[in-house]
Image (cartoon, rainbow, N blue to C red):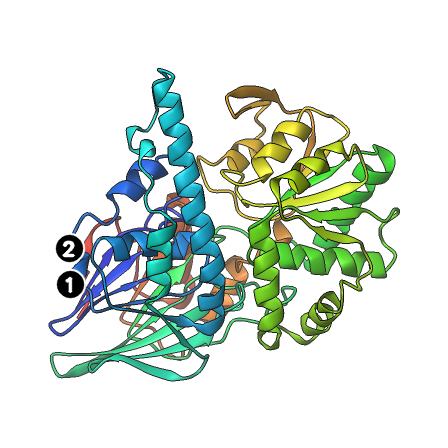
């Protein structure tokens, strides 16, 4: 049995793991790279005969795990893509949006080329895929429920367990028959932080021959939720009531946006906000994702289910929430000079409407930008978190005078303690543990911690390298 780590090895994004035995060949995840060098890496990601794949197993809908599915299908893969039913519904929103972004960015690149500009990425004039390819990939989705065994191949059995990360996210238990023996692989996907708003805690797993575990926050601990909430309250009250500015929150349309609506409404209900802000969710995809969340509200924890029912009942929530649809609606927010919280995608500021709001708000010192999620290296969000005093947006140099807050405790990713806690449920060490989905230094530190505290054999796999494991 072989595993090739085609992405998310020594970095956070681009999740793709190729599993091969003498009987079967399949991918776990098919995600896009994000950040520095991602354009070239995404264009080169599937330059092999993907038609030989038997099927794909998908852990969840985030683009760094799912975003290359349309390219996979356009390159000749015609098999089934297995994932949870909630993820299927989210992908219908996310992959079409991703395709639209690909087409638009290629159009802008061609326009710049026509004007005689030198492009940093020559590949950028061609979209990775378009809306037609995205629709084709959706036809190959097969929705499954949690805790139900699936047989995608006579020699493979799979069970999806709740990962507590975003709606529909899953830990994969995979049993493979190879050379007359059954081996069990566990793919953590992205694990959620226990006690996180909206989602249930990650499902504990007790046994595996091989574990592939994420390490996004494997080098740090999140602040306690109450301390984090107090930090958020101070940032909001200082910006809206003291400085009379606006707040920008870059947030992934799936997961983080719904988290923030829940948290902000709860804070208002508790009377912890000095003034009642106007909340704009400026992302058609976030609106669609919220509707999908309402549809699958039974997958959420009890408090979240109650909030979602209120939101569904004509938005009877403690705060006025406006979901924008059109470009004109989005532009109209620019006329709001203060008292607004603007939640917009993308979460790492590299695409979407958040870039327009940054251009219009970063230069004003009364404003704030609040980061509530991980910012990968090379992304605009990471540059801002790291203290850039000027950033380039739409061909303009924009000074950064707005205050910046990083609220780490709201992350939908498990921190080091939560990751170790989840691994601690295994009753005996696996034959080998592979640490993925972390920046290189973080993944190495976390691998060392697993080895020293659990006495497991641990590897940090190299990108593109094949490992024979059984």
Q: How many marks?
A: 2
Question: Considering only vertical position in the picture, is 442 above or below 36?
Answer: below
Q: Report how far apart the C-alphas of labels 2 and 1 lie in the structure.
A: 6 Å
Q: Secondary structure at mark 2?
A: loop
How far across and down, in percent of the image, does residue 147 sit?
44, 82
- Does dot 1 land on a helix, a strand or a loop? helix
Q: Is residue 237 visible?
A: yes
In which quadrant of the rendered view does residue 15 lie? Answer: bottom left
Residue occupying the point 73% across, 73% down:
306
Residue 225's quadrant in the figure?
bottom right
Give the number of the disc on residue 205. none
The answer, for residue 29, to whether it is visible in the render is no
- CB within 8 Å, label 2 to label 1: yes
Please give the name of the residue rendered at 73% of the width and 68% of the height, measured from the top-left corner: 307
Q: Position of residue 470 (x, y in %)?
A: 17, 71
Q: Which mark is residue 49?
A: 2
């Amino acid at each position: 049995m072989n595993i090739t780590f085609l992405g998310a090895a020594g970095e956070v994004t681009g999740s793709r793991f190729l599993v091969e035995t003498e009987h079967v060949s399949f991918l776990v995840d098919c995600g896009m790279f994000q950040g520095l060098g991602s354009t070239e890496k995404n264009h080169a990601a599937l330059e092999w005969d993907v038609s030989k794949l038997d099927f794909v197993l998908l852990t969840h809908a985030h683009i760094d795990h799912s975003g290359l599915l349309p390219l996979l299908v356009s390159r000749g893969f015609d098999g089934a893509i297995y994932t949870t039913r909630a993820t299927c519904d989210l992908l219908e929103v996310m992959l079409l949006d991703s395709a639209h972004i690909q087409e638009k960015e290629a159009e802008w690149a061609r326009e710049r080329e026509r004007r005689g500009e030198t492009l940093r990425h020559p590949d950028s004039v061609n979209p990775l895929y378009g809306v037609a390819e995205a629709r084709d990939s959706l036809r190959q989705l097969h929705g499954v429920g949690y805790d139900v065994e699936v047989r995608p191949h006579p020699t493979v059995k799979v069970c999806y367990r709740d990962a507590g990360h975003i709606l529909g996210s899953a830990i994969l238990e995979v049993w493979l028959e190879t050379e007359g023996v059954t081996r069990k692989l566990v793919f953590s996907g992205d694990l959620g932080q226990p006690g996180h708003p909206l989602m249930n805690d990650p499902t504990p797993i007790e046994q595996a021959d091989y574990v592939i575990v994420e390490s996004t926050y494997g080098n740090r601990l999140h602040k306690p939720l109450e301390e984090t909430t107090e930090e958020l309250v101070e940032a909001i009250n200082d910006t809206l009531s003291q400085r009379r500015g606006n707040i920008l929150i870059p947030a992934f349309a799936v997961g983080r946006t719904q988290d923030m609506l829940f948290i902000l409404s709860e804070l208002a209900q508790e009377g912890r906000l000095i003034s009642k802000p106007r909340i704009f969710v400026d992302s058609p995809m976030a609106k669609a994702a919220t509707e999908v969340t309402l549809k699958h509200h039974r997958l959420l924890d009890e408090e979240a289910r109650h909030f979602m029912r209120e939101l569904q009942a004509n938005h009877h929530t403690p705060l006025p929430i406006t979901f924008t649809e059109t470009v004109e609606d989005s532009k109209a927010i620019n006329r709001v000079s203060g008292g607004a919280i603007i939640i917009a995608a993308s979460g790492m500021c590299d695409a979407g409407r958040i870039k327009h709001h940054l251009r219009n708000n970063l230069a004003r010192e009364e404003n704030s930008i609040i980061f509530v999620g991980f910012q990968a290296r090379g992304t605009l969000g990471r540059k801002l978190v790291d203290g850039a005093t000027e950033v380039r947006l739409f061909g303009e140099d924009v000074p950064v005078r707005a205050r910046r807050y990083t609220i780490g405790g709201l992350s939908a990713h498990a921190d080091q303690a939560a990751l170790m806690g989840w691994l601690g449920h295994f009753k005996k060490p696996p034959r080998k543990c592979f640490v993925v989905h972390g920046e290189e230094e973080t993944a190495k530190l976390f691998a060392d911690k697993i080895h020293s505290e659990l006495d497991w054999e641990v590897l940090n796999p190299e990108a593109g390298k094949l490992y024979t494991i059984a």
